[in-house]
């Protein structure tokens, strides 16, 4: 019997602002730009909505500017409280990626999960942190320490991976073993080597683990960093590795798709990857 979930992804560019504007003004402008898309998702009956990586800020990691530390906030905190009102109003689960402050100097790249009644369910902290030219993330974030939680939301069992995590199949499998039906990957990635991998790795995760994925990327060039062009192309992929829907490369956009979760049982009954896996033979995977 069909069990369909209507899901949405929001990709957005940084508003044109004075580069010297106070950081809190930049965050508020980025939030305000996406509120109409959040409201549109609610009006269209989206049941699960995912925003992009650190949705309310620019991707500031091409710098090593400690001033951005002050933009981190508790999770749950003021932004999750604010968006919980939209979740409750529209009966819409929301995945809200944020720069999290646990304590002074203890900062994470995180994503909060808010249920359809506005209740905060928990968070995922990005596990794999890159540190290479233009992506100085270890300067800003500690590695996540919460494992790979799966959230039993009103509409589906949801897991979260964040951006660079997608290059690592181990966590993707852990989410499947924990029962994830849809895994969301909010990202910030620019044209170059990653463009080919963007439409390769995540369909492979969906196939290998028998779940849907919703993959979000921002758009545009963000001054003053000018790291490159964030190329959008957010998409949903099904457990067969087939694209369900894909967004544009250069436009702010709300992408909506209907995901038939009954397909999970059909696919997993055909490809018995969970039956045939051999955890007894995988010790070397966790060796240093």
Image (cartoon, helix red, strand yellow):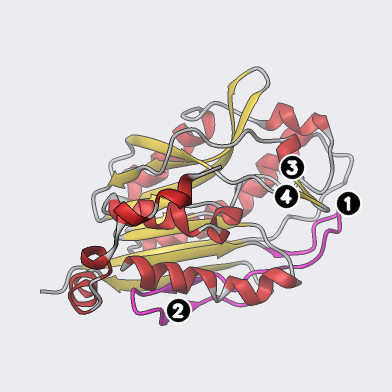
Q: Categorize mark 4 by other alpha carbons within 10 Å: few (<14), some (14-19), many (20+).
A: many
Residue that label 3 marks:
26
| Foreground tag (3 vs 1) | 1
If you read the primary sequence from the N terminus, does the residue marked by circle 1 or circle 4 appear first? 4
Q: Earlier in the sequence, mark 3 or mark 4?
A: 3
In depth, the one of 251 and 169 nearer the eye is 169
Q: CA distance from mark 1 to mark 2?
A: 32 Å
Q: Secondary structure at mark 3?
A: helix
Vertical order, 224 against 198 (above or below): above
Q: Which callout, 2 or 3, points to the residue nearer the camera?
A: 2
Residue 31 among magenta residues: no
Q: Which mark is residue 224?
A: 1
Task: Measure the alpha-carbon separation of dots 2 and 4.
Answer: 25 Å
Disc nearer the start of the sequence (2/3): 3
Relative to 124, does residue 274 appear above or below in the rendering? below
Query: Label 4 belongs to which residue?
Result: 59
Going by the image, does 206 lie left or right of 61?
left
Pick out the residue farthest to the top. 104
User: Magenta segment, which residues?
Assistant: 219-248
Q: Which residue is mark 2?
A: 245
State which tag comes first along the sequence, 3 or 1: 3
Q: Tag 4, which secondary structure? A: loop
Circle 2: element type? strand
Residue 214 x, y percent position in the rendering:
44, 65
Q: Does residue 246 appear left or right of residue 179 in this picture?
A: right
Mark nearest the camera among 3 and 4 is 4
């Amino acid at each position: 019997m069909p069990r369909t979930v209507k899901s949405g992804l929001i990709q957005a560019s940084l508003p044109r602002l004075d580069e010297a504007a106070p950081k809190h003004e930049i965050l508020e402008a980025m939030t305000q730009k996406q509120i109409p898309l959040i409201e549109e998702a609610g009006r269209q009956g989206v049941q699960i909505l995912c925003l992009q990586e650190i949705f309310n800020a620019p991707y500031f990691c091409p710098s090593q500017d400690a001033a951005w530390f002050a933009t981190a906030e508790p999770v749950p905190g003021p932004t999750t409280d604010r968006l919980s009102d939209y979740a409750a109003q529209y009966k819409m689960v929301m995945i809200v990626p944020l720069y999290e402050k646990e304590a002074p100097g203890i900062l994470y790249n995180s994503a909060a999960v808010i249920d359809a009644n506005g209740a905060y369910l928990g968070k995922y902290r990005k596990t794999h942190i890159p540190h290479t030219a233009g992506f100085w993330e270890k300067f800003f974030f500690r590695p996540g320490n919460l494992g790979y939680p799966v959230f039993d939301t009103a509409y589906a069992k949801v897991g979260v991976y964040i951006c660079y995590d997608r290059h690592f199949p181990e966590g993707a499998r852990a989410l499947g073993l924990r029962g994830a039906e849809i895994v969301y990957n909010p990202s910030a990635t620019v044209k170059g080597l990653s463009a080919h991998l963007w439409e390769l790795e995540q369909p492979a995760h969906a196939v290998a683990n028998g779940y849907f994925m919703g993959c979000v990327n921002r758009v545009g060039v963000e001054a003053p960093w000018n790291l490159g062009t964030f190329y959008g192309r957010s998409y949903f992929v099904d457990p067969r590795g087939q694209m369900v829907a894909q967004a544009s490369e250069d436009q702010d956009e709300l992408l909506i798709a209907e995901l038939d979760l009954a397909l999970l049982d059909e696919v997993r009954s055909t490809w018995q990857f969970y039956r045939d896996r051999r955890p007894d033979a995988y010790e070397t995977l966790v060796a240093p």
